[in-house]
Image (tube, rainbow, N blue to C red):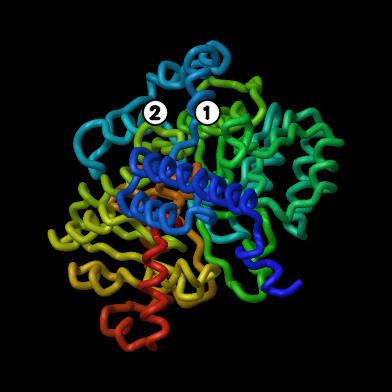
Amino acid sequence: MGWREWSVFNLSTTEITVIGIALAVVEVIAIASAVRAVMTARTSQGALAWIGALITLPVISVPLYWIFGRARFHGYVDVRRERLEGMNELIGDVTPRVSEYVVVAPPGLGAGLVLPELASLPFTRGNHTELLVNGEETFDAIFDLIDSAERYLLSQFFIVNDDELGRKYKERLIARAREGVDVYFLYDEIGSRKMTRRYLADLRAAGVHVTGINTTRGFTNRFQVNFRNHRKIVLADAKAAIVGGLNVGDEYMDLDRKLTPWRDTAILLEGPEVLACQLTFVEDWHWATGEVPRLSWEPRASTKSDRVAFVLPSGPADEFETCSLFFRHAANTAKRRLWIATPYFVPDEGTIGALELAAMRGVDVRILMPGLPDKPFIKLAGLSYVAEMARAGVKMFEYGDGFMHQKVMLLDDNVCSIGTANFDNRSFRLNFEISIVTADEGFAAEVEQMLLADLEKSTLIDAADVASRPIPFKVGSRVARLFSPIL
């Protein structure tokens, strides 16, 4: 059938009327959605981007907005409220149980109780931490932790692949489950989209408790696919936990042809603060299943060291923008040094300003990004910040030995953060993340040596370097930055 047969001039009056009514309805929905974007968007840039798209291209933008435009994970908020009303008697209140270990915020993070207020969790002493560099160290420690579990084991990852490492990981969990350990396996369905049904069936057949995060659980959350549970936690018997940037996949063991060697970091935590990691897992498990695992809530002080630590869970169900406020707080309180290693550097304007002000007052601000990106478009957006940040004195580096995926921050002489949060809008506002903050000069010195080794493999990039790159690169970089609110 040719164009003439499809022409609007060949439509009947009734058909034209129906099309007109449908378009009018879509436009009304687009206007209502634009109003909602104004009222609920967490950034003015995001609100303006959605308003422009909704008004000019309503047929395309309306469904995209209701899938990607939600700023808060309201279903999770409701479940959290239920926990506050009914779950405390089951899992106990962590703060009173660890009261003998609670300490005030240490020097290096500013005065007051900003971070405990953000997380509703305290700093504690009696903790021990170990730095885990790259896949071999991390998964050796993870497998040792799995093998040491006596009563229960909690496993949560954003990505679990059915590949060589994934199958080794599965067999370790199955072995513990068959020996009577309660094993809980929580994964993000979108991140773990390559995981097979057979993989999950094998776990369930061995008695492992398995669930996806179920982001779209509940009728009003059916289109809530833009939120991700990006946390990575392995925890045994409330005695130890491992948190970091690594997922379960061959690429994290240097088996990816394009991104090898893979540079990443995790942290092993022992002590009272492990209960905060456990509470974070239980909240996610309860959201996904409506159930609360029977776990131990008795704190265990480490006999190896007496370090001060703090667990910062963050996500789109929080009352405040916990993740972005954490990084801004670090920038605002830094006195001597602020080093940040991140695979994705696409911050909001407020965070950029905080970094620039820190550099202007003499703080040694360094940003370490991958030279070899796994997501080139995000890398382009990150490079668009180089010129203005260099003018303020911020030093930006490209890592040159494979792909760098670690999420590490070093603040002054004693504070560091290792976790799952990237330095971008998705981690700031859309992902559930977890970071472990330590306040210990000895551990900070270890992190410093690790980052100095990374910087030796990196190249300083400045405004002149970016300006010398080809025109398509510069145009692409600015275009990519326009999309930063939704990257």
For the residues labelled 2 and 1, say whether their Cβ atoms are less than 8 Å apart.
yes
Crowding around mark 1 (Cα neighbors within 10 Å: few <14, some 14 to 19, many 20+) is: some
Residue appearing at x 37%, y 66% in the figure: 481
Determine if residue 215 is in view.
yes
Cα distance, mark 2 to mark 1? 10 Å
According to the image, label 1 marks what residue? 279
Is 470 in front, or is 60?
Answer: 60
Task: Look at label 2 and name its amino acid.
Answer: Leu
According to the image, label 2 marks what residue? 121
Q: Position of residue 9 (x, y in %)?
A: 61, 65
Q: Give the quadrant of the N terminus.
A: bottom right
* In this picture, residue 238 sits left or right of residue 289: left
Quarter of the image for residue 125 reads top left
Is tag 2's residue or tag 1's residue first in the polypeptide sequence? Answer: 2
Residue appearing at x 42%, y 77% in the figure: 476
Per the rendering, the mark at residue 306 is: none
Determine if residue 424 is in view.
no
Residue appearing at x 35%, y 57% in the figure: 347
Q: Position of residue 281 (x, y in %)?
A: 57, 33
Task: Look at label 1 and name its amino acid.
Answer: Leu
Disc tally is 2
